[in-house]
Amino acid sequence: MAKANARSQAKSKSATTSPSDRMRELEKEIRHHQELYYVKHRQILSDRQFDRLLEELSVLEKEHPDLVREDSPTRLVGSDLDNKFDKFTHTIPVLSLANTYSTEEALAWAEKTASKDDSILVEWKVDGATLVLYYENGKLVRAVTRGSGQVGDIVTTNALTIRSIPASLSKPLNVVVRGEAYMRFDEFDAFNEQQGNIYANPRNLVSGSLKHKKSRETALRPIRWVAFEAFFEKSKSESDSDQLRQLVELGLPVFDDSLAVPVSKLAKTIESYKKKLGKLAFPVDGLVLKIDSLSRRLDLGHTSASPRWATALKFEPELGETTVEEIEVFTGRTGRVTPRARLTPVKLAGTTVTYATLHNADYIEALGVRVGSRVKVSKRGEIIPAVEEVVDQGSGPEFVFPKKCPSCKSKLLRDEDAVDWLCPNPECDDKLMNALSFYCQRKQMDIAGLGERNIEILFKEGLIKHIPDLYTLGDHKEKLQNKEGFGQKSVQIILDGVEESKKKEFKRVLPSLGLRELGHSVTEILIDHGLTSIDDMIALAAEKDAVEKLQEIHGIGPNTASAIVEQLTDKKILAMIKVMQKHGLQFIQKVEKSDLPQTFAGQVWCVTGSFANFKPRDLAMEEVKRRGGKTVSSVSAKTTHLLAGEGAGSKLDQAKKFKTQIVDETEFLSLIK
Ligand SMILES: [Zn+2]
């Protein structure tokens, strides 16, 4: 629908303005908003409005290919070309720094190196992937990974899909900028969840994405980039911090909490950074300390390995030492077999940790971990605990990753990327049970009384096997009530919950089925695009060029498109959907036409805490949406309002940081009156 809109807009505009004028106008406007958002952290347009501008421009570009500029911002959405990564020898030093884990040593370095007049520039050491941007005459001509430090991979088409990287600068300068591509914890979590939690941490996902073969896929990943060091062809700057300010003027994003301080204040500054550590929205692994003056850097020079004028102060992730009691292996609903370590409980970052992930078979082999090993486990940010290091392997037998599914004993197969082992059996008990649990989860259909334990009991009893079986549970009411631990009351809760789920909207039903790539956000994209029922989607999937058509939808990449088509033409899946339709589940999305004035249009709201008038708080979100506003689950620079109820926690701090407007329940009630 957005597409049709953009087209008619383009047509009506072209009646008065020539296409080329309109295209230049759009390019300018898009760049302006990109800069506002990523450099100045201000948002005027909603994501949707921003996407419409891009959409209008890309429609015009298709109609007038001769007028397309090489640095068009439509490249933000990537291309389908397979990238071959040519090599490039860096023209600037991409150095590795001397580093220390000791604040005392870092301070001693500063005392020894800095003169009285020197300032030390303090920056976060972001845990991402280095990406160097080469601008010529203000145009991005090359983006290169760190590679060996001397030679990196050219990943320009992928870099152009990262919205915080401008294709052109505000002045036609020659400059090379070293920066870091990274991902925020909340955006990583949301993306990872949608993909079935297959990524271990944001850093791995970022570096993998930079070298993805299809830039269209890279475009879908929430990567950000931030500048740390500039090399101007001609520079009058005397200091690094001054150069960073110039980068901001050029439209490049820079963290605004980098500080240049005299040595006497360094200890205090380091302390204040450390205090912020637990609250950061993105992963860091330390601080970078650099002499700010550029001429002093020349004086100080390099050792054979690293510059004398800089050092990295790394932060030890909080580690707990404990013993591996067991290595357990699970088959998930997608068939992926994941190992985890059961540990002797250990206190870590304020919580007791009993399990830690071991990621996959290769990870276990690389660590050499076995039952009885003494290990160090870490818990960073919001990521699940992981076994980081083996302190003492112990004398137990070497762990052998199973060749057969721990549940159904099918022979395991390697996945496409040869990282994971998969159970290929569609009728595998653990896969089916996990699919049922997933369907009933709070975030999905939210069926009361059907947690993992009860599902396992009902499954083993033979009462449920596939999702549609939940809807015939009523036939076994008596049998259920007589089961130990299942009295009349709890059976009624389950049956009511199952009945209630028939009222759940289609946009909730579809992602709950657990089909590959068809999570909440993809479902919403399809619905927004006018595919408002399962029948619409199935009809499209049956068309000859369905994969191409789906890819035309903004936000749907090639992998997602193929997965949708493959599954929505699968006879078994279609049969299951048919049974569920017969049971009365919603497979058509009701599109509510709101008569209310759209007073929240263009606003982005986050809702946190609890409310007297909105229980659950989703009801408050509905009010926002009905008035044209958008809702999000976490506060970011894009969020315009935070509705804070009783017991609002960390989101309040985030809102203060981003200067988001904070609204309480009383104010909100008057806004919606
Ligand atoms: Zn299996």
Image: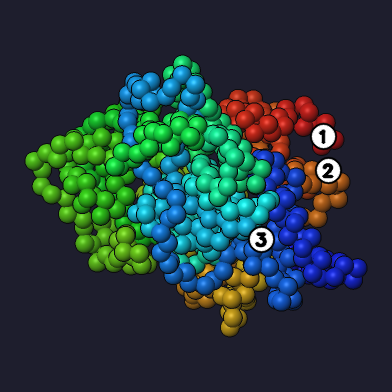
Element class at badge 3: helix
Q: Position of residue 307 (x, y in %)?
A: 37, 38
Label 1 or label 3, whichever comes before in sequence order:
3
In the image, 64 versus 430, the foreground residue is 64
Residue at the left extreme of this rendering: 395
Specify how the rendered protein is coloured: rainbow
Task: Identify the residue under disc 1.
Answer: 671
Task: Identify the residue under disc 3.
Answer: 73
Element class at badge 2: loop
| Marks 2, 3: nearer the viewer | 3
Question: At x 60% / y 25%, what residue is drawn?
Answer: 647
Tell me the distance, in whole angstroms, between the alpha carbons under discs 1 and 2. 9 Å
Element class at badge 1: helix
| Marks 1, 3: nearer the viewer | 3
Q: Position of residue 318 (x, y in %)?
A: 34, 30
Q: Residues within 10 Å of mark 3 (few under 14, many from 20)?
A: many
Question: At x 29% / y 36%, what residue is drawn?
Answer: 377
The answer to whether the residue bearing label 1 lies less than 8 angstroms from the nearest atom of ligand 1 is no
Label 1 or label 2, whichever comes before in sequence order:
2
Q: Which amino acid type is shown beneath numbered disc 1?
A: Leu
Q: Which amino acid type is shown beneath numbered disc 2?
A: Thr
Q: Position of residue 99 (x, y in %)?
A: 33, 34
Residue 442 position (above or below residue 17): above
Q: Which amino acid type is shown beneath numbered disc 3?
A: Pro
Q: Quadrant of the N terminus?
A: bottom right
Residue 572 position (above or below residue 635): below
In the image, 546 versus 104, the foreground residue is 104
Q: Position of residue 23 (x, y in %)?
A: 77, 65
